Amino acid sequence: MIKIAITDDHPLLLEGLKNILGNESQIEMVSCFKTVKEMMEGLASNPYDVILLDINLSDTNSIELIQPIKKLYPDLEIIMLSVHNEFAVINSCLMEGAAGYIQKNASIEEITNGIISVNNGNKYLCQQSQIIIDKNKGNNINSIPKLTRREKEILLEAATGLTTNQIAEKLFISPHTVESHRKNLIVKFQTSNLSSAIKLGIEYGLISQ
């Protein structure tokens, strides 16, 4: 039996997956978590084979959790659950160490196959995500940029419409420092302006709308 856990902060989806996967003969539905805190406490006290992890939990961007979880539990396989189907997001998850990536509108058969596949040591993408990866093979698109804490703060404040001077005043830093971070964000997102960087930040789940 494959022991699995699910981390998702949407009660209906969590309950639905729990009920459906609980009927699968090869899968033992062990735990459901709604927050990162619950998940980390659960991982520390129980052994799991596979965890299904929502990519956009309300209290964090889950992509940043993949490496720390794998470092603590190298035998635990992580499948990301997501509504995003952009190459950069999928690629980032795989580069960080996720074993699978499944769209939330995927069939239960795909989810079940994904759990069994990663438990056997394979990588798994749902059909929609595999198509995106195949289309972008050979492209120069890399992954979601890694932002510093300050860059994330400035991206978030800029997304609310604050000017450079307003951001500087709110964060107690100089306008020159804000401008430097704004330029770095444009470079990291490979865009021509900050508005496009903000749009990508929303798409990638780095900031909320």
Image (spheres, grey):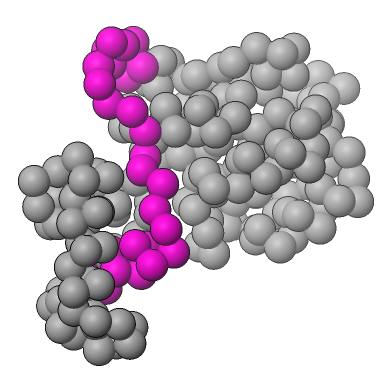
Q: Is residue 16 magenta?
A: no
What residue is at 60 percent from the left and 47 percent from the top? 65
Relative to residue 178, is residue 92 drawn left or right?
Answer: right
Image: magenta residue range: 131-158
Which quadrant is home to the C terminus? bottom left
**Where in the figure is residue 81, as x and y percent of width and height?**
52, 37
| Above or below, comparing residue 72 to residue 25 in the picture | below
Say which residue appears at 19% left-offset and 50% top-offset.
186
Q: Is the residue 52 above or below the residue 157 in the image?
A: above
- Regarding residue 111, the answer to whether it shows in the image is no
Give the number of marks: 0
Q: Is residue 146 magenta?
A: yes
Quadrant occupied by the N terminus: top right
Where 62 falls versus 75 (above or below)?
A: below
Horizontal placement of 109 versus 117: left or right? left
Residue 110 appears in the rendering: yes
Position of residue 76 measured from the top left corner of the image (x, y, whole percent):
76, 32
Q: Quadrant of residue 48?
A: top right
Q: Residue at x 30, y 82 (%)?
A: 173
Q: Nearer the viewer, residue 92 or 15?
A: 92
Where is residue 50 drawn, in percent x and y? 74, 31
User: Which quadrant holds residue 145?
Assistant: top left
Task: Tell me the residue at 21%/64% (across/down).
Answer: 180
